[in-house]
Amino acid sequence: MDHHRALRKGFPEVVFGEGKTPEQIAAIAEELVRGSGRALGTRGSGEAFAAVQRRVPEAHYHETARVIEVRQRGRAETAVSGVVVAAAGTADLPVAEEAAVTARALGCEVGCLYDVGIAGLHRLLEHLETLRRARVIVAVAGMEGALPSLVAGLVAAPVIAVPTSVGYGTSYGGLTALLAMLNSCSPGVAVVNIDNGFGAGYLAALIARAGS
Amino acid sequence: MDHHRALRKGFPEVVFGEGKTPEQIAAIAEELVRGSGRALGTRGSGEAFAAVQRRVPEAHYHETARVIEVRQRGRAETAVSGVVVAAAGTADLPVAEEAAVTARALGCEVGCLYDVGIAGLHRLLEHLETLRRARVIVAVAGMEGALPSLVAGLVAAPVIAVPTSVGYGTSYGGLTALLAMLNSCSPGVAVVNIDNGFGAGYLAALIARAGS
Amino acid sequence: MDHHRALRKGFPEVVFGEGKTPEQIAAIAEELVRGSGRALGTRGSGEAFAAVQRRVPEAHYHETARVIEVRQRGRAETAVSGVVVAAAGTADLPVAEEAAVTARALGCEVGCLYDVGIAGLHRLLEHLETLRRARVIVAVAGMEGALPSLVAGLVAAPVIAVPTSVGYGTSYGGLTALLAMLNSCSPGVAVVNIDNGFGAGYLAALIARAGS
Amino acid sequence: MDHHRALRKGFPEVVFGEGKTPEQIAAIAEELVRGSGRALGTRGSGEAFAAVQRRVPEAHYHETARVIEVRQRGRAETAVSGVVVAAAGTADLPVAEEAAVTARALGCEVGCLYDVGIAGLHRLLEHLETLRRARVIVAVAGMEGALPSLVAGLVAAPVIAVPTSVGYGTSYGGLTALLAMLNSCSPGVAVVNIDNGFGAGYLAALIARAGS
Amino acid sequence: MDHHRALRKGFPEVVFGEGKTPEQIAAIAEELVRGSGRALGTRGSGEAFAAVQRRVPEAHYHETARVIEVRQRGRAETAVSGVVVAAAGTADLPVAEEAAVTARALGCEVGCLYDVGIAGLHRLLEHLETLRRARVIVAVAGMEGALPSLVAGLVAAPVIAVPTSVGYGTSYGGLTALLAMLNSCSPGVAVVNIDNGFGAGYLAALIARAGS
Amino acid sequence: MDHHRALRKGFPEVVFGEGKTPEQIAAIAEELVRGSGRALGTRGSGEAFAAVQRRVPEAHYHETARVIEVRQRGRAETAVSGVVVAAAGTADLPVAEEAAVTARALGCEVGCLYDVGIAGLHRLLEHLETLRRARVIVAVAGMEGALPSLVAGLVAAPVIAVPTSVGYGTSYGGLTALLAMLNSCSPGVAVVNIDNGFGAGYLAALIARAGS
Amino acid sequence: MDHHRALRKGFPEVVFGEGKTPEQIAAIAEELVRGSGRALGTRGSGEAFAAVQRRVPEAHYHETARVIEVRQRGRAETAVSGVVVAAAGTADLPVAEEAAVTARALGCEVGCLYDVGIAGLHRLLEHLETLRRARVIVAVAGMEGALPSLVAGLVAAPVIAVPTSVGYGTSYGGLTALLAMLNSCSPGVAVVNIDNGFGAGYLAALIARAGS
Amino acid sequence: MDHHRALRKGFPEVVFGEGKTPEQIAAIAEELVRGSGRALGTRGSGEAFAAVQRRVPEAHYHETARVIEVRQRGRAETAVSGVVVAAAGTADLPVAEEAAVTARALGCEVGCLYDVGIAGLHRLLEHLETLRRARVIVAVAGMEGALPSLVAGLVAAPVIAVPTSVGYGTSYGGLTALLAMLNSCSPGVAVVNIDNGFGAGYLAALIARAGS
């Protein structure tokens, strides 16, 4: 049985940074880069980035997304277009950016629509054409988590919903948004774990590439 | 300390029918009518209505709402206008009708907008003017429960949100809709218990009358 | 479609401070003030207030409520009367004050009744007349959350219930109070999110103004 | 180690009827009666009572409480006074009656106050003297479960709180009432399982007898 | 704003049958067929099918999937290939079939792999090539819900996970499988609501068509 | 209506320290002492005690129980005997001591049995006679919370069960122990909130005094 | 990769009957018997047994355990001794019997101790020697689920805990017992799913055979 | 009744370090060592180890497992073979090591297989022979918790599943993994509390010794 990772050609290998020390992240990143010239480190702090940079000077840090990226050798691959990331509020930005940075690292062109939550419907509707041209949409929201339903009711593309832990009281760390998204009355929506911007960006890239 | 019910003048007394036998409901309704000439029976089955009618022939049955109403003596009160009941899906109708029938029994004119859920946004927006003229709006929804947020983002009136037990799987009998409504990012929303159309209609009447 | 905010005339725009840095809050507040001469910042720390004050010297800080308020240009609007805020215990004061400050910022006169919880019933009953004169009541309580039921059984006005995260063990950060309030056996009660004093004050102002 | 049951002298032995067939209940009851001349069968249906009566003709059925009682040989014990059972609503009656019947079977005089819930405070206050004369109070309520807190704030006796499964939506089969009772801000309250009228009556008898 | 449904060209309109009477389903189906010559009815009982057939004789019933399908006018559209539906156990078949029938109704060729759960790993590995040739995979499982993780670790295609309510005790009607799927350590997985075979098939078709 | 507190003669008034500053606790304690010469402060830190002592030099600190006590004027009341506090593990001691100190402050003689949990049954059985002589028993346990059931099966006295937040993983901060205690198969048990040693001691004193 | 089932030599194959029709169970059982001469059908109703017997006349029905067993060809294997099944209450018998029947079908001698719950400790202690001679103990209990902790504190053998759905109110269908068992303060306990007597008996047989 | 600990001969006594100060742990450890020459301290920090070492210089610290071990007098017991500990991810190592260190301290030879989670199936299958030779397997996993099911489907030995709190969002501190493990569709699995490596190692040793 050959290895699964070989199947996902052109994708960087990934180190999930949460719960690891900067030194551990740096060591794993260095090893990944040595193998393929590329690496992606999610949930990486500034300290983690500094540690990586000491070993791999070409490393780049996406601060809002908290993603460390290394693309050592210049591969001129043609980017796949059609990924749109939409986020409800400004507090959802880190998760949305994690999705966008991930999809770009996997070879996609990504458009971003921020602050288009349900409380200000006119802002979302201003971007209707952008949404309808997308091949796949990542919709990111906390609190009542209504954005994916709203978007899926307006477009024909698949929608990947990402609940965020934004909110207080009965938002229960994103559980309310997650449940709302699972119960979307608009078909065409699937959901990833709370705050899992990486997973949504990864899946969006798989879908966009399948269609390219 | 004088009685609370005396304070809510012009309101019929209410018997909550769930868990009571038709005979019990009929006996209580008869007693209420004897006192004030009026009564409202919620969650009443067809059998309960038949039992009431045998004792109080003037009783009227609102079938979808499952409400039994008696208004024995003709009081020509001026109805208070400005209550709108909006419901997301057809399965939410019994709860929405319970709210509408209740508010009407408490002296309000009630407008109804049905099938205006988030998956078909254009249907809701067609009724924007009706919504904006309302003094108070009851917004009824199951599944992801997004309608109250959407409405509150479009109007300046208070919105009473009613989660319904419509849905399956992780809708958890209306809990998902309830949580979503409590986490509305649009201010101006408050929530009543799952399927509590009576409570929403009652509160809407209190608000509309306060403003009349 | 014209903007929603235009509909709520005379209301300041609001910045929700939780999870934002003092500098971010100050920048948003300054921009809001530039537009309308007014702003309200909720969940603002002392540091956030200092940062706002550096940019907007007229800013005022409601310390217990943790609300920053700017009312730059003196508009002599007539206040709407009839809002009462009742709180069960002293630990509920920050949430109660957030409700009161918010309703006042939205043009209401607000009366406050504190330490009137269910364990000392005589204290609540001493204020029965104040409660019965109210147009709308905000009832704030943690622990077993019984105050809104008790109040709604004594008055004819709508009651907005605010559960607080006050308690320990099975209070579950306000969930117990929230559930109790949703299950009130007194009609006329609706509920907002845990610790959401802002939302309750905002809704109370909408109701009081509708009735003015 | 001698047997525990010997310690609780004068108490009938008990068969818990739920999940047992009428024939099983009757067989166990007959055996208990043969031993001590007494037996108590809780959660017994009419069919169960009929089956018991065929074997033990002296059996008596408390229909609302669903308790089957046998007191074969006339023991003239002096009843212990001071137990009061208070119930919030009429739907709580079966549980309240189970508590009252149990405490009486264990040798107590029991006074009952029904329909004294928080929504009609004046009814409870009419019985203040009865409550204050009690040695131990069983307070039974569903929905928001506020009665025990209210009572414990008015008396000096211990209060045993019994949540009932009365309610709908977020009452969650009595869980809301249970949580509210555990979080009572009045000291002097302890709680038994949902709908456990038997357990409350049993404990009340233990307390009353300890004090006699 | 033009209608959303127009965007999803070639898709039949859908009536969700749960909670509707056979007569209601038949009436809606007839109306949909009159408009577009096509309709899909999910969660339809045998009685519902009989009622539809009386009005629309061309209706066809997918019994295991409980889906009623009408494709009145023969459109010779080219089917999109690449959808695979994999199910863990035989009890998951109705949900898996609902997904397969839905995707076929939306113009896809669908391959099915049944009884390939984690307890019999060799059966899954026998079909590795089929899985690796898929463009999108629907993975259906109840109980511990491990199948989607296992599949996503073996392929490069996006995986749509469908938890089913199969199990007992702590399976909690599919919640355990749902949570397990959301926490998949294999990237490339997104999840739909419990037992939502329709949603998974619909989304799979959107993805497959995007890539055709 | 005279005050409730007058009813509980001889009891000190209580300030619940959690969430209050040392200065707030000291101010309230001083005021209570000024009124009745006595006060009890629960959940008081060492800093809180120091602050109280500066204002009320007679204050005494029960360190393990975290209770501050003031008994200024020497009342020679006869102590009520018969309260026993039993605790399962050493980590349960602070809660058990809070119960014991509270009951003593309310005029009871209290015996303590520590480290008598279910895993070392012989230790509990060594104290069987002490348990059987008690008038009321407070049983304190975390983790699986089995001690109250075990004790209630061995004695004829009422048992007040106190779940503690001792444990990890699925102990869920005492919820598991609480649920186990509510489901005791031994009758004669009632439960207070998690870690509520004060409430258990207070109730034990009410019961013991009722029986004196 | 050779098949897993070949590894568990001498074990009958198993059909899990819940959710299958009698005809489906009979067909599967017949096929299993054809292969190996043996089969075990769990959660089988009387109707299922009748259906199996029509196809496989040698089938035997364990009624309380609801297990159908076929052992067609007489293999004289030596039984492994040392399995004891202990159950707390009579309502736990079906689950306990399922465990015992399963372990016997897998070649073990099984001793049974019933009605040895925590409320009647003396009954358990009478069987101490039997428990201490066991190689592995299955402890079955509902309600507060304390039996496994109690047993594990008395013996040196591994204890498999089986929570049952016996109870009411906050027993939550066995969840309370499950949580209590997971939090056992006695080491040497592991837990299976609620009501999973089959799984416990199977695991007990694996352990006993490993030690034979 | 002789003491339980005497029954588990050759086992060191254990102090559970969580929630105890270094000084408390050291004092208990010293006392245990004085009695039997051996002790095991779980959940011990580096500070706790330093405190123990000051009193018992022979103490040894297993850093990853956070276990302090003392084996003062050299007993040359023959180790029992056949325990294998398998862990899904590197973040599960502390719990896996706690299990391995515990089993070794109880006289077992333990083999360890790390980083063999479900997302990289080939790594697990490389170790198939090691797994199949085991007498008992401890399977440790967080996130979706699928490893025990996977392993139990491949071997004939009993599998002890240990959920870990590794994960984020809906992993709920290990609850998702726990539920998945309880619902394993492979028979032969039992589960211990979240992160309870000690309990798993202890039980594995009991099983392995029973079979030696």
Image: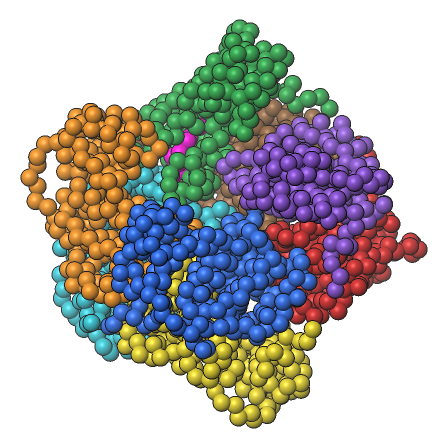
Chain colours: A yellow, B orange, C cyan, D green, E blue, F brown, G purple, H red
Residue H99 occupies which quadrant of the picture? bottom right
The answer to if E177 sits in the magenta stretch is no
- Magenta region: D138-148
Left or right of residue F65, residue A181 in this image: left
- Residue visible at 52% across and 41% down in the picture: G172
- The residue nearer to you, when weighing D9 against D167, is D167
Residue F168 in the image, given as x and y percentages of width and height:
62, 52
Left or right of residue F11, residue B192 in this image: left
Is E134 rendered above or below residue C144?
Answer: below
- The residue nearer to you, when weighing F65 against A15, is A15
Furthest residue to the left?
Answer: B76
Q: Quadrant of the N terminus of chain A?
A: bottom right
The answer to if D140 sits in the magenta stretch is yes
- Residue visible at 62% across and 34% down in the picture: G50
Residue C38 in the image, given as x and y percentages of width and height:
23, 71
- Residue visible at 74% across and 59% down in the picture: G3
Q: Is residue B116 visible?
A: yes
Residue A48 in the image, given as x and y percentages of width and height:
59, 79
